[in-house]
Image (cartoon, rainbow, N blue to C red):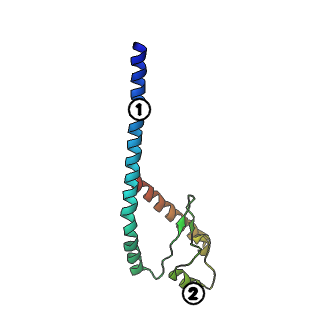
Amino acid sequence: EHLVYGLGDIIAKMITGGMLCFVRTAERRDALGEIILKHSSLNTAFVSLLRAGFDHILPCTVDGSGTCWLPEKHTPDGQVLVSILNRPMSGAFSDLIADEKEQAKFKDFVQERLQQAQNECAR
């Protein structure tokens, strides 16, 4: 009798723990989805604000090492910059920066922004 109650207790606790883990994972997934939806609409507003202060805006993709990669297909701003610079723009954005000190500053800036974004998502 004690063995049956003991096994039943252990099984009930395992099922309850599994259900709580499932609920917690579902809540985090939903929260992440809400954050993505919230920030996806901000992208257009940020681009509009950037347009007010900068002549050219280049979207890029950042990898885990903090390298900012330019897209293969250029945006209209990218095409204008290609004609102004008279050189191809592909690969890492830091390759376009001539000074090594400025390249390091840019990489540090990207790392800080990534850290800031991770901290925001962790909240």
Could you say which is closer to the camera, residue 4 or residue 74? 4
Query: Can residue 5 be seen in this snapshot?
Result: yes
Spot occupied by residue 50 in the image (x, y as percentages of width and height): 41, 76
Spot occupied by residue 88 in the image (x, y as percentages of width and height): 63, 80
Residue at 57 percent across and 87 percent down: it is 84
The number of numbered discs placed on residues in the rendered structure image is: 2
Q: Is residue 106 left or right of residue 4?
A: right
Q: Quadrant of residue 95?
A: bottom right
| 65, above or below 89, in the image | above
Please give the residue where the numbered disc 2 appears in the rendered image. 84
| 120, above or below 68, in the image | above
The N terminus lies in which quarter of the figure?
top left
Q: Is residue 103 left or right of residue 112?
A: right
Spot occupied by residue 91 in the image (x, y as percentages of width and height): 62, 71
Q: Is mark 1 on a helix, strand or loop?
A: helix
Residue at 41 percent across and 80 percent down: it is 51
Judged by depth in the image, the label closer to the viewer, 2 or 1, is 1
Q: Give the residue type at disc 2.
A: Ile
Could you say which is closer to the camera, residue 86 or residue 40? 40
Q: In this view, does 70 lie to the left or right of 49?
A: right
Q: In which quarter of the image is residue 94?
A: bottom right
Q: Give the residue type at disc 1.
A: Ile
| 40, above or below 25, in the image | below
Query: Can residue 98 be seen in this snapshot?
Result: no
Q: Which of marks 2 and 1 is nearer the N terminus?
A: 1
Spot occupied by residue 62 in the image (x, y as percentages of width and height): 54, 64
Label 1, residues with CA under 10 Å away: few <14, some 14-19, many ≥20: few
Q: Residue 15 carries which label?
A: 1
Residue at 53 percent across and 66 percent down: it is 61
Label 2, residues with CA under 10 Å away: few <14, some 14-19, many ≥20: few
Labels 2 and 1 touching (C-beta < 8 A): no
Could you say which is closer to the camera, residue 100 or residue 114? 114
